[in-house]
Amino acid sequence: MAGPLRFAVVGLGHFAQTSILPAFRRNRGAQLAALVSGTDEKLTTLGRRYGVARQCDYADYDALLASGEIDAVFVSLPNDLHADAVMRAAAHGIHVLCEKPMAPTEEECVEMIEACERARVKLMIAYRLHFQAGNLHVLDLIKKGSIGDPHVFSSVFAYQVREGNTRIQARAGAGPLFDIGVYCINAARYVFGAEPIAVHAHRIENDSDERFKDVEEGVAATLRFPHGRVASFICSYGASDRQHYEVIGTKGVIDVEEAYTHAGPMAVSVTKHGRKTRKRFGKSDQIAAEIIYFTRCVREDIEPEPSGREGLIDVHIIRAIDEAASTGREVEISALHDPPPEPAQKITVPAHDEPKTVGGVESPSR
């Protein structure tokens, strides 16, 4: 392939405007070649800001895919719209980088994977933390035996969701489990380097808050892993900001502050034999890192990690958690496996300032 990999960003919501679009400015191997949105103001203003002449309404998406003007799409739509956008891109031979969670159902995930396999295009799910230095440092510490054998994982991911946000609308893939619980699930899997075998869970309901008329306020879950390992987490839309996990091993403890952040620094502490050491990791452009890696996968014909299968496994676990919360019983999780990220995947790109948003988009948190 001569020249940069030409991307269309599909969906211009808050995350796309503040994180995805700016990431292309520092990536010589990739070019922001087209914008897709249903809002004229977003297309016009952002097209001018980033020098993108090809601006496309959703109704013209297939024409863009068939135009020969793009090589890849970065799908940043609400969760229930991922599958359609991905499969239409694959049908035109376009490579796909898709935001997580992959889709609301396992069936859709499988269809997405199969569509990309038939078309022989790359499919990567945007697990940005698979390239982030702090989380990969945790995996390196565990791999080296710094805390012995990891036995317990516990995590909280919470924020106060903004009224009217897409994440709390009555639509498939809405709610805190899909939005932020997926981070806790994925982290537990790569920390243990294994897949869960069963889950207990319950929903945190809040009928007194109008925000939660269509979705639960939160979810609490406990995942059983092989060899007696346990992971527990709470994800909540009704609590103060918290992004944290800890790993308790046979010889020490790893504590990760701001573990899931995409817009700030984080820190990793190790406590062992009564002594605590702390390493800080500054803010970085995690989306640029994803784009760099994905571009490399396309050019060198490498199967991406995280692949579509990685996205499928997390959705498989989410559906089991949802069933456990509904029935009040432990639910077994069938064996699916995908290799965890490796410390060598680290890509660090300097952070950018947050740009001004257009089209009335707001942060999901208030």
Image: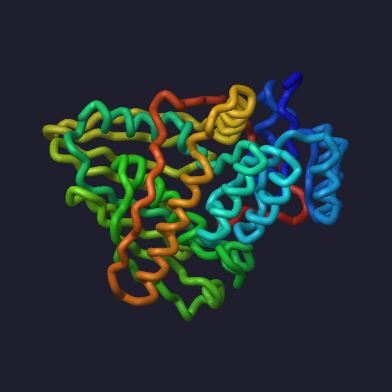
Question: Taking the image as drawn, is residue 74 in sight?
Answer: yes
Q: Is residue 353 left or right of residue 180?
A: right
Image location of residue 245, percent across then percent down: 33, 46
Image location of residue 214, percent across then percent down: 55, 75
Residue 316: image quadrant is bottom left
Which residue shows up at 66% across the image and 25% down it?
A: 27
Which residue shows up at 14% across the image and 40% down it?
A: 250
Front residue of 153/71: it is 71
How many numbered marks are there? Answer: 0
**Quadrant in which the N terminus appears:** top right
Which residue shows up at 33% across the image and 67% down it?
A: 201
171 shown above or below 34: below
Q: Is residue 59 left or right of residue 84?
A: right
89 shown above or below 146: below
Image location of residue 249, percent across then percent down: 19, 40
Q: Is residue 48 left or right of residue 81?
A: right
Front residue of 120/302: it is 120
**Residue closest to the far top:** 2
